[in-house]
Every structure is written in structure tokens, then in C-alpha cells.
Image (spheres, rainbow, N blue to C red):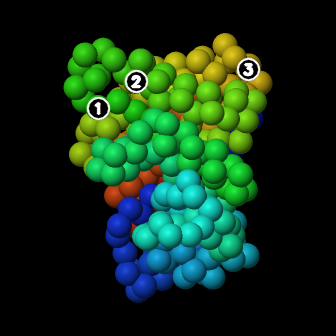
């Protein structure tokens, strides 16, 4: 059985006070979540605050990005070792905003996945198509290309240490969620692509859905056989809403 994972991607939101309030709410409510694992990915500057607050709780945390470099003259970058220094467990890699706004290529994303693993972090690898690509019926080829770059870099067996997040770009922050069937189709496709190379890895692979997942649509999405949790943006900034999604996951 795959343990569901629900991860909050806070993006560039929050303040010391709002984060303290949010964490208080999550800590109070986490006991009501059955089996799902919870994680939050704050802006890097707040990781020390989050790490302190969540130490000795079941809630994990992670980075939103990492450098492919170890250390040195890379202004503005944060290394995987810095994240693990604060006991981060996860790191989001290749989010569509990083790909589209900061020019991250499939190759760079694959390098970052490898670096995350080398640092002892679990990468949450984001894949997903643009609206124009969906309309041109290229969803599978795009997702395939994004996945293949990573598999080519780390090898199929190592995919057992990766979490995949399918995030159709047209659904991110738009309020336009993929239907449960649309999401399930792509999740099943991803699992199948991995299965032809290693059935065991495919069976154990956690594939999260991301893109306008909210408390009121989470249950239908989570009920799909190949959806193993969520990567939640806007709805992860409110404790009650995020916890409701976590409960829907299991
Ligand atoms: P959203 O973002 O839930 O606000 O659509 C999801 C994401 O970008 O990971």
C-alpha cells in the first residue's frame, strides 16, 4: 500500500506571524488525519522557523527548489545540504513555475533530482503539460519527455526514492481543476510508463496530483486508484482547508 502524501507548496507567501498561525493550526489538527503523511514547503527563509515549530511532530517539511551545486559562488542559491542541515525531508523539483519563469530545462531538473537524492532528500518531481499541449493532444508525450530525462539520469531503480507530482499547468492557481478522470488517465499513464521498466518501482511510486486541489474537490480526486495525494498551492495556506484535503487523502 502506498501511504498518501499531501504537501503544501506555500510558494512566495507568508510572514513570521502568518506562518506561526498556520503551523499552530496544522499541529492542532494533524491528529485527526488518519493515514496520510503531511508536509509543507515554505519559502526558504522561513525553514528555520518551520523546522523549530515542527520538530517532534509528524509533519515534515521541505524546500521549494535546490541548487545543482554543493557550495560556493552561486548568489541566491540554496544547496541540498543546507536543506538537510535543517532536517528537511522533501524538496520540490521542476515545478512548472521554475520551468516557465526561470528557464529550468528537463536536463537541469534531472540534475536537481539527482542532487536532491545525493543529499538525502526525497525529490517531489513535478511534471505536466501546458494548455496548448493538452489541446494538441501532446499531454502524454510531454509528461513522457519530462519523466524520461529523470529516469535516464538516475536509473529506473532509483525512481523508488522519488515522488512524482502530476500538475497540469493550466490547472495551477487557475481554479480550473483537472477532472478526476483527466487526472487519473495521466497518473495511470505515468505508472504504466514506469511499470514497463520496473513493476515494483511503479507499484510503490507515489504520484500526487496538483492544480487547484481544494477541500471540496479533494475527495473525488483522491478516490482515483492512481492518485496518491496532492501538491497543494493556494489551499495549503489555510490550516482548516489544508487539513480537510489531508483527511480526504486518508
Ligand atoms: P494551486 O498550486 O493548488 O494553487 O493550483 C499547486 C502547485 O503549484 O503546486
Q: Residue at x 41, y 63 (%)?
A: 10
Q: How many marks?
A: 3
Task: Residue under label 2, please give it.
Answer: 142
The Cα atoms of the two marked residues, 2 and 3, are separated by 21 Å
* Residue 90 vertical placement versus 228 (above, below): below
- Which residue extends farthest bottom? 17
Question: Dot 2, how many residues are within 10 Å of its Cα: few (below 14), some (14-19), or many (20+)?
Answer: some
Image quarter for residue 199?
Answer: top right
Image quarter for residue 96?
Answer: top left
Task: Residue under label 1, please give it.
Answer: 130
Q: In the image shown, does 150 or 44 lie closer to the viewer?
A: 150
The Cα atoms of the two marked residues, 2 and 1, are separated by 9 Å
Q: Position of residue 1 (x, y in %)?
A: 74, 35
Q: In the image shown, does 248 or 70 lie closer to the viewer?
A: 70
Instruction: Tell me whether the residue at label 2 lies in contact with that at label 1, contact meaning CB atoms closer than 8 angstroms.
Output: yes
Question: Dot 1, how many residues are within 10 Å of its Cα: few (below 14), some (14-19), or many (20+)?
Answer: some
Task: Residue under label 3, please give it.
Answer: 198
| Label number found at residue 139 | none
Badge 3 marks a residue whose secondary structure is loop
Q: Position of residue 44 (x, y in %)?
A: 48, 71
Amino acid at each position: 500500500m502506498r501511504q498518501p502524501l499531501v504537501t503544501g507548496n506555500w510558494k512566495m507567501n507568508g510572514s513570521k506571524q502568518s506562518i506561526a498561525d498556520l503551523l499552530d493550526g496544522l499541529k492542532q489538527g494533524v491528529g485527526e488525519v488518519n493515514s496520510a503523511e503531511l508536509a509543507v514547503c515554505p519559502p526558504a527563509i522561513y525553514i528555520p522557523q518551520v523546522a523549530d515549530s515542527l520538530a517532534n511532530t509528524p509533519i515534515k517539511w521541505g524546500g521549494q527548489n535546490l541548487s545543482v551545486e554543493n557550495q560556493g559562488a552561486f548568489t541566491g542559491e540554496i544547496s541540498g545540504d543546507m536543506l538537510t542541515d535543517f532536517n528537511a525531508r522533501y524538496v520540490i523539483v521542476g515545478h512548472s513555475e521554475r520551468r516557465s519563469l526561470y528557464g529550468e530545462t528537463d536536463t537541469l531538473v534531472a540534475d536537481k533530482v539527482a542532487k536532491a537524492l545525493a543529499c538525502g532528500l526525497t525529490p517531489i518531481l513535478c511534471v505536466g503539460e501546458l494548455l496548448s499541449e493538452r489541446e494538441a493532444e501532446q499531454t502524454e508525450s510531454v509528461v513522457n519527455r519530462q519523466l524520461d530525462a529523470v529516469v535516464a539520469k538516475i536509473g529506473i531503480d532509483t525512481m523508488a526514492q522519488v515522488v512524482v507530482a502530476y500538475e497540469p499547468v493550466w490547472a495551477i492557481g487557475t481554479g480550473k481543476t483537472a477532472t478526476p478522470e483527466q487526472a487519473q488517465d495521466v497518473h495511470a499513464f505515468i505508472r504504466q510508463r514506469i511499470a514497463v521498466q520496473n513493476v515494483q518501482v511503479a507499484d510503490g511510486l507515489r504520484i500526487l496530483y496538483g492544480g487547484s486541489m481544494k477541500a471540496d474537490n479533494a475527495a473525488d480526486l483522491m478516490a482515483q486508484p492512481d492518485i496518491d495525494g496532492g501538491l497543494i498551492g493556494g489551499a495549503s495556506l489555510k490550516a482548516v482547508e489544508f487539513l480537510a484535503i489531508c483527511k480526504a487523502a486518508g
